[in-house]
């Protein structure tokens, strides 16, 4: 495989390497493998929609910017909470959705994704490639 276009943050590389032996489902494996590829090889200057708020009852959305910046947000139909914008996947996945004001229960984004077995994740919505 060719050299990655983007060097991962140390924290993200450690997370992705750790996850290799600890996937809880095939969908989780697919998520981490595809996200890693995107973060290393697929720039998203016009954003990459990973989760659309209308695709889940909690109205959570996830957007990847450039290579490895992420926005986690919440809302629907013009009524949106303040977004959580981070520079690393590891920060996004560790975000507590209650502390952000998105949900009424303490749960990280990673645990929320695991609960739903990654249902609704999109891998083909990089607007720069459409």
Image: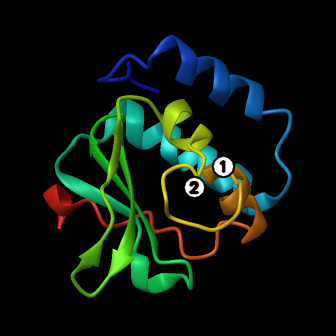
Label placed on residue 43: none
Outermost residue on the top side: it is 10
- The answer to whether 2 appears left or right of 96 in the picture is left
Q: Are marks 2 and 1 in contact (CB under 8 Å)?
A: yes
Q: Which residue is denoted by mark 1 in the rendering?
A: 108
> Residue 96 location in percent, x, y?
60, 47
Judging depth in this view, the residue of 124 and 55 nearest the camera is 55
> Residue 11 location in percent, x, y?
56, 17
Q: Which residue is denoted by mark 2 in the rendering?
A: 97
Q: Quadrant of residue 113?
A: bottom right
Measured in 3D between alpha carbons, the distance from the residue under mark 2 to the one under mark 1, in whole angstroms, is 6 Å
Q: How is the image coloured?
A: rainbow
Classify mark 1: helix, strand or loop.
loop
- The answer to whether 125 appears left or right of 72 in the picture is left
Q: Quadrant of residue 63?
A: bottom left
> Residue 47 location in percent, x, y?
22, 54
Location of the C terminus (image quadrant): bottom left
Which residue is found at the position 75% from the left and 60% from the top? 114
> Dot 2: within a 10 Å radius of its alpha carbon, few (fewer than 14), some, or many (20 or more) residues?
many
């Amino acid at each position: 495989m060719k050299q990655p276009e983007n060097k991962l943050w140390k924290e993200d590389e450690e997370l992705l390497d750790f996850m290799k032996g600890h996937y809880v489902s095939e969908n989780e494996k697919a998520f981490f493998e595809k996200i890693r590829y995107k973060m290393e090889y697929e720039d998203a200057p016009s954003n990459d929609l990973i989760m659309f708020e209308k695709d889940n009852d909690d109205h959570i959305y996830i957007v990847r910017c450039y290579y490895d910046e992420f926005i986690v947000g919440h809302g629907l139909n013009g009524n949106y909470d303040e977004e959580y914008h981070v520079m690393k996947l590891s920060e996004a996945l560790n975000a507590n959705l209650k502390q952000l004001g998105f949900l009424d229960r303490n749960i990280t984004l990673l645990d929320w994704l695991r609960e739903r077995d990654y249902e609704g994740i999109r891998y083909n919505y990089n607007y720069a490639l459409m």
